[in-house]
Every structure is written in structure tokens, then in C-alpha cells.
Image: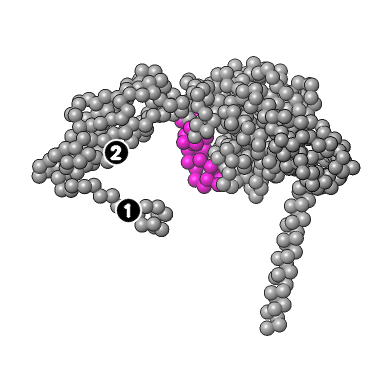
Amino acid sequence: MLRRWMRYLALATLAVLFALSTLETSIGAEAREIRPGRLVVRLRQGASAPSLDRRSSAVLGEERVDDVLGYRLVRVTSGQEPAARDALRRDPAVESVEYDFVAHALLVPSDPYYPQQWGLARINAPSAWDRARGTGVLVAIVDTGIDLDHPDLVARIAPGGLNFVAPGTPPADDNGHGTHVAGIAAASLNGLGVVGVAPEARLLPIKVLDASGSGSYYDIMDSIRYAADQGARVINLSLGGLFDVSYLRDAVNYARARGAVVVAAAGNDPIQTYYPAAYPGVVAVSAVDSGDRIAAFSSRGSYIGIAAPGVTVASTAWRGSGESYVSRSGTSMAAPHVAGVVALVRGVRPALSGDEAVGVLKRAAYPLGDSSLYGAGLLDAAAAVHEVTTLTASQSTVLLLAPGGVPSLPTTVVLRGGSGSFSTSVQPNGGWLTVQPASSSFASDGAATLRLTSTPQTVGATALVSDTALQISAPQSDPPALTIPVRLIVSPTYTAVHLPLAQRGAWGTW
């Protein structure tokens, strides 16, 4: 008995030591990622700005204020961040105080440059270019900046870029990460080195990461808000950090509320969750190789939205490194593939909301299995563009079943990819098919729903089978007309339609 208790005591001791070790590791990681000498403060609604530097000798004063999102960057004595945070939290005018963490470019070192851009072919981008090239869509690249004079990018650079690392200077790259990301998203189709997924999109360069590839959460917050205010339709964030803070989440929500799709690299650590990728509404992109296998480095989890090429991806290089083109790996490389396809889709369907555009990408994705690895599946540019430019119906044929003397149960047909108005007719018209609405217009996402039912039919001893076809005329769509065969079967045996009910607990519903 004593030996058994000693064994239990030893196991319990090991468990406590492991828990303490894990806690110390977590605390140590947080300390290493805190931006020294800075806190992010938000005042309560209606509160006037207090004299923050009077709350603690460690508080030195305000450095910057984002009046739109309501956050203040406060300078504190380096090494005294916890004490300053605790002092400010006691101020009744202060709603929140958080650390300003460091985010990093999510790049994995790769093999030497290969000229083949396998990723474009794998997501079927060339097949989409006859209908969509992202013309005029503003794509914000929040990163280390862009090589502004690179021959494959110079024609794509939009005015209004901003440098948060060295304010007042151009958002020029001094690392190479941002230039590589920009080329994947939108390098020009000009016969030179590489081509981007959306070769006619416009690039808004926003520099928030320094020459080492690191940057401030607060600057990233400001950059997301700035990109949204500049009208960016998609914001690419090939960066991330390990800490969830309210001010970064609020910036993402601000951008989404203004119609921007926020795309982020999922992260390069299979056991870590990265932000902003893990925030609700962000399209978190995992990385796959040329065999559609999840990259060993790619983060995974329930927040993954979609997968894209991210291993040995060829793109533009910052020429200060001595090269013009290079191959790199990382979820940083996967994310701009997705941003580019968002630009393709929104270029041909400008009225799409951000959520509608993301829905198109996810429906078009090729399923690869485990959603914690691949999300909705592998990005497919051609399928996404097809959905928003080609009129299709959710059912190629419709079967209506009815008992004698009563109408059939309603059946819906969803039209996708339409433009403008449409009308319906029945040919040949047997008088038994009802379609609602008879005419209408497609919604902003190019979709419309038709409701089909039959009028009551009486039958004798044998079943009645009737055939007709639903004709859909949509002059502004491609194709401008669709024909959907419809068959009605009226049974003389039953006077009512009986539907089986699933027992609660068996399938979780009725």
C-alpha cells in the first residue's frame, strides 16, 4: 500500500512540475513578444482623456492616438510594462490596457529559386484569366513594404501607400518578404519574370514590418484601419503573432464592416494558434505542397478557412538582396494566392459583400479532407470565377412527387452566376407547373431562388407522369438562357405525402 501511495505521489509531483514548466514557458514566450516601452490603452466611452503620465512614474505619455478605433499608444519605461499596466487599469476612465506585442512575417526558408510557378496551375488561375484578372481591385499588402520599382510590380502600385515603421518615407521593402507576397497576389502579366494570381489588380503597399521581418501589433491595427479607409477590397496579412488582443480584433471587424475581405497566413507552427488569422471573419490560409499535402510547418485548427500553395513558391524578390526572383515557403506565400482570387471574384462582381466573396471561394474549393488542416479545401480560382460569371442551376433536372388531388411539396432551384434581371416560362405548358417568382433580378452575389410546385392533379388507377421544362431567360448572363427538365409523378395510392422523421438523438435533428 505504501509503495502504491508513493507511486501516486511521484506521478502527482511530475504533473505539477510539468504544469509549472508549461506556465513558465507561456509566461516567458509572452515576455519575449512584448514590444518594450509601449502599452495600448482605451478609454471608457464618454470619458475625457486623463493625464495618463500622472498614474505612475513608469508612464511617460501618449505617443499616438487612433481616433477612429479609439486606442492610444502610450510610452512607458522599458521593463516597467506590467507595473504601468496595473497602474493604468486602476484609472476609472480607462476601459482596457494591453501590451503591444510583436508580430512576425510567417516565412519558412526555402530552396533556391525554381522558375516554375506550380501554384498558379494548381489553383487553376490561368483558366480564370479569360474572364477575370482582378482589374482595378485594390489589394492592400500589409507587410515589409514592396520593391516599388520592381519591373513586375511597378505598374500595379497604387498611390496612397504608407510606412508605419519610418513615417514620412515611402513604403519601400528592406527585407524581401512583402515584395514576394505582392508578386504572388498581383505581379503583372507582362512577359517578364512571374505573374500574379490577379495580374491587373492594384497593390496598396503598407509597411508595418521592419528589415528583420518584425513589427508592432499597434501598427498592424493602424494599418488595417488605414487600408479599409483607403477602399481596399482585400487586405493581405502574411504575418502573425501568438497573442489575442482586443485592439487588433477591433481593427479586423472595422475593415470587414467596410466591405474588405481580410486574408491572413494561418501560421508556421503546427501546435500554435496565430492572430489575426484566428479571429472570426478572417480567412485563415494553410499551406500545401504540389501534391496537395499539408505543409509540415503549417498551423492547423478549427480556424483554418482554406488551403493554398505555400511550399517553394516562385515570386518577385526585393532587388536589394541581389536577386529579382526567388522561391520561398510559408503560409505567408499561401495567403496572397487567396487574396488574388478574392480580387478576381470582386473584379467581375463588384457588388459582392465581403462575406459573399468568401462564400464563393469556399464553395469553389476542392475538398481535401480534414477541415482542421485544409478548411474548405484547396483554393480553385477557375471554379470561383465560374460561379460568379456563369449562370448555373443547383438542379439539372427536377422531380416533383404528389398524391392525387393535392399539390406537390415545394422544390427550390438556386440559380448562381447571373446578372441583371431574369424571367421564367414553361415549355411545353401543360398548365400544372407553378414557378415563383416568374421574373425578378439576381441578388448582389449573383444568386436567385426559384420555388417550383405543381397544381393539384386527379388520377385514375395508375400513376400520372407528366414532363415539361423550365426555361430561364437571363439576357445579361452567360449563358443567357437555361433549360431545366421537370417531371411530375402523381400517385393514385396515397392521399397525403408522408415524410419520415429522424428520431432525435439518431441524427441530432427531426
In the rendered view, tell whether residue 57 sits above or below residue 437: below
How packed mark 2 is, by other alpha carbons closer than 10 Å (few <14, some 14-19, many 20 or more), is: some
User: Which residue is depicted at the point 65% across and 25% down?
Assistant: 229
Q: Does the magenta stretch include residue 375?
A: yes
In the rendered view, tell whether residue 67 sits above or below residue 189: below
Q: What stretch is highlighted in magenta?
A: 360-383
Q: Does the magenta stretch include residue 459?
A: no
Picture quarter containing residue 435? top left
Name the side, left or right, on which 205 lies relative to 291.
right
SS of the residue under disc 2: loop
Instruction: Choose between 377 and 459: the one closer to the eye.
Output: 459
User: Which residue is depicted at the point 71% across and 82% down?
Assistant: 2
SS of the residue under disc 1: loop
Picture quarter containing residue 7? bottom right
Using the rendered image of the protein, determine whether residue 325 is visible from the camera's viewpoint.
no
Q: Which residue lies furthest to the left in this view?
A: 461
Residue type at numbered disc 2 = Pro
User: Which residue is depicted at the point 76% across and 31% down?
Assistant: 65
Name the side, left or right, on which 294 lies relative to 95.
left
Instruction: Choose between 324 and 30: the one closer to the eye.
Output: 30
Disc number placed over residue 70 in the picture, else none: none
How packed mark 1 is, by other alpha carbons closer than 10 Å (few <14, some 14-19, many 20 or more), is: few
Residue labelled with disc 1: 501
Q: Which residue lies furthest to the bottom in this view?
A: 1
Disc number placed over residue 410 in the picture, else none: 2
Labels 1 and 2: the sequence-earlier one: 2
Mark 1 and mark 2: span between their CA atoms? Answer: 18 Å
Using the rendered image of the protein, determine whether residue 203 is visible from the camera's viewpoint.
yes
Question: Residue 402: image x %, image y %?
Answer: 21, 42
Picture quarter containing residue 181? top right
Question: Residue 43: image x %, image y %?
Answer: 74, 38
